[in-house]
Amino acid sequence: MAKLLALRMRGIRSIGDEEHVIDFLDPLTIIQGPNGTGKTTTIEALNYITTGALPTGKLATFIHNNKLANKNRVDALIQMKFISCDGREVTATKRMASVIKGAKSTNKSDEYTILIKDKFGNETSLSSKVTDFNKEMVNFLGVPKAILDNKMIKELETEIRSIDAELPYLKGYIQDKINEKQKLEHYLDKIEENRKKIEENNKSSEDMQVQLELVRNKLADFEQVQIKLAGLKPQVQMYREQKRSLNVPDFPGTEDDIRVEISKLLNSQDFNNAETERQTIEKEVVKVDSELLETSKKIREHQNDLNQASADDIRRKDLVKERSDLSKQVNLKYGIIPDADLNTVLLKKKSVMDVELVDFRKSVQKEQEEITNVVNQAREIIATQKSMETMKKSELSRLAPAIAKLEFELSKAETEDSAPAISQDSVPLEDPPVNFPMGVRRKEDYTNGYADGYKSGYITGYSRGYADGRVLQMTTLRKNLEEKKAQKASLLKEVEEIRHTLPQHQAELEENEQKRAKLNQEARSEEQRKTIEINELNEFIKQLLQFDSKLGNLKDNFDLIDSLKRKIEQLNESMQTLQNKKAMLERRMTSISSKQHEKRVLEDQLKKMEITQQLAVLEPELAKISAQFQSCEDLKKKEQSLNKQCLDLEHAVHRMSGEQGELSKRVDEIRRKLSEARYRDAQKAYRDKFIEKVCRMKSIDDLNKYWKIVDDMIIEFHRTKMEQINYILQDLWAKVYQGNDIETIKIKSEAVGKDEKKKSYDYSVVMTIDQVDIDMRDRCSAGQKVLASILIRIALAEVFGGHCPILALDEPTTNLDSEKIDNIAITLKRLIAHSSSSISSFRSNGNSSNSNQPNRRNLQLIVITHDQRLVDHLYLACRPEYTYGLSKDETGVSHIRIHQRLMDSQALYNA
Ligand SMILES: Nc1ncnc2c1ncn2[C@@H]1O[C@H](COP(=O)(O)OP(=O)(O)OP(=O)(O)O)[C@@H](O)[C@H]1O
């Protein structure tokens, strides 16, 4: 059984440098103290060292405040010594520190340690660096671990998931490997196939080369045939065309007959005479033709000249008409008599107009200058008057305050009748007193009047002098005022005059400016008009001169036209004569040409006969050679085809060789890929993983079965424990609660959530009234609530304490009335008294055969309270060797003292 021995604390909450050491008593330790002295701190320290749970606010607020300690570093310590559930002495130590550096504060925990001493005094230590401190503490205290989670199954499921994620990859590798192998086989087949094809192609290529050689040899023999054919073909063609062009019937005789006929004809007299005449006529015709040509050429030339002359004449007439129209227009415009020399008249008129324009400009300039002078003078006058007015006004504005000031001084002087009191000592002789009236302060007044009186050094003298001075001063002021007023009147008059005359001058100025503007406008438009007229006249003169120059170039050519027309007529007549002559000669030629025709026909027939004979020889030869040439053509075609086939085979071989290279590369690549570990070992890896997965799944099945059993056991365990708790609760309530309203209380549990693997329960505390269970929440008093919670804690500790029968109660009597405090005290007393025996013995109707009864235990109780009544009860009941008393000093630091007597602890509250 675990048992607490001591707790040592420093630097926690209100505990400062002075260590709090609590040596726990068995069975009861009482820690007593008023509010805020550190009672809960003790419970929190116990909780932290045993479970690692920190109160809200974390480490920062748990460690004693640096400001309160007035230190930049506060070191905190919690150390608990206890007997572990297996009987060893264990000392657990946790050290923390709060450090302030500048404005920054840091809190840190040092390494936690556990020192274990076995019954032989051998010591071993554990550090939080190598072990889970909290887990170890729970083990040492023997508190059973409440929850068996399904972490293992989860881990297995996670592993299966990761295997499941891996398997497709491995499968992929296997599939890849199969595919790659298939590809490899395919490429190897292809390489073999190509190799065979290349061999076949090479063989075919060699055969074809042999055939090609044969064909080429034959073609070399045919070259002569080709040359012959090339010569014969055009010759035969030529003969055929000649024969076709000889459009004469075949001669009905032999070649010699035709020759005899021709010779007969050539030797006849008629043929010779006709021939001579024909030659003469031919010469005549040539001559006439040349004359005709010459004449027609001349006609064309004359006709061209005539056309040009006619066009010039038309142009000249048009110009004459245009000039005459222009002259009429000009005559009409300027009133010139029709027969006058227009150019001369216009030039004269132009020079007159030029002079007029110059004169006009001069006169306008003069007028402008005159009126500009008038305007400028008017402006000067106005400017002078305006500046005069401004000057006068400023003089007037200066006069106004001077007059006002004089008027003020005068009225002031008139109202002052006696001299101001003055002591001789206080007034300097040289200067007039500053507080004297204005007039007297002037230098001349001072010397002339007032100074005489004053200088006498007597007050009477001063008064007389002052009176004289005042008279003089007032006279001077009046005179000055009159002068200023007269000056003002004169200035006002002058300003008025200026105001009167200024508008007249301005009106005159405006009138003259308008006149000047009008004059400028008129002069501009007049000058424009004159300029336009002169320009117009210039234009006329220019046009007339242009007409004259054009007409000067186009002379009257009537005679030329007439003579050309006559020449053309004569030449036409000569043409006609020549054509008649030529017609006559042609008619004569026709009459003598029959003999010639006869001779020509005979000659053509002879020629046709000769050509026919030639063709009779050549055409069969051509046919023969052509036939030979045809077979040569076939050979050429064959050569071409063989050449092409050879080339195709060569290309195919090249292409396949290239393909072979590419295929070899792919084969190498696939072999390299297949030699990679992931492909090489893919099947094995897949098999291993698959086996792993199956094993894991089997494990999950087993674990699920195990889980089910454990879960059922937990449910059973839970049910049993709840029954035990409720049994104890019922018993405790009956003993402690004195009222007769609530019969008993119990904890009700209900399973929530549908997840079988995450079973959880909702708990509620119910009270039984008239055999009916009612939820206690919000239906009971604060006292009933506190009582119920203490009893529940006792029951829970009783049932779940396991090998750790230690119960610490913090303020168990809060909100309880004195009667209930007494009852709680009695209950705790009984609990302690019977802790060494079976708990059933302190139940009123204990039934030792009940399966719900918990086991025997040695309860160690720690009661932390401020309640003196409870302390009194417990002290008297258990008579502990000592109690602990907590107090707090004026600096807010807690202190702990041991009290041997009850009175000492009572003194805590009187201090
Ligand atoms: N980090 C800290 N540093 C210094 N003092 C602190 C710190 N945290 C809390 N305290 C003070 O410690 C005192 C003890 O608090 P604790 O809760 O332990 O008192 P208590 O005796 O349980 O009071 P009560 O009976 O009122 O519950 C309080 O006065 C509180 O102000």
Image (cartoon, rainbow, N blue to C red):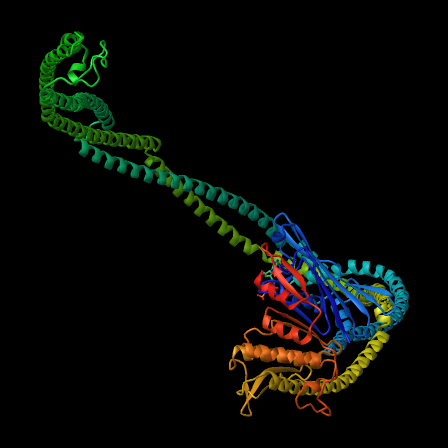
Q: Is residue 294 above or below residue 454?
A: below
Horizontal and vertical percent for residue 643? 83, 64
**Quadrant where the image shows the C terminus:** bottom right
Horizontal and vertical percent for residue 757? 69, 82
Q: Is residue 750 above or below residue 51?
A: below
Quadrant in the rendering for residue 888: bottom right
Horizontal and vertical percent for residue 907? 60, 64
Horizontal and vertical percent for residue 730? 62, 87
Asked whether the viewer can see residue 14, the reply is yes
Quick one: 455 or 176, which is closer to the camera? 455
State the residue at coordinates (15%, 7%): 452
Q: Is residue 393 left or right of residue 790?
A: left
Ligand 1 location (quadrant): bottom right
**Quadrant where the image shows the N terminus:** bottom right
Quick one: 68 or 152, which is closer to the camera? 68
Asked whether the viewer can see residue 628, the reply is no
Q: In this view, does 399 lie above or below 173?
A: above
Quadrant in the rendering for residue 675: bottom right
Quick one: 654 or 504, which is closer to the camera? 504
Quadrant in the rendering for residue 124: bottom right
How many labels sit on residues? 0
Quick one: 308 or 504, which is closer to the camera? 504
Q: In this view, does 281 lie above or below 340?
A: below
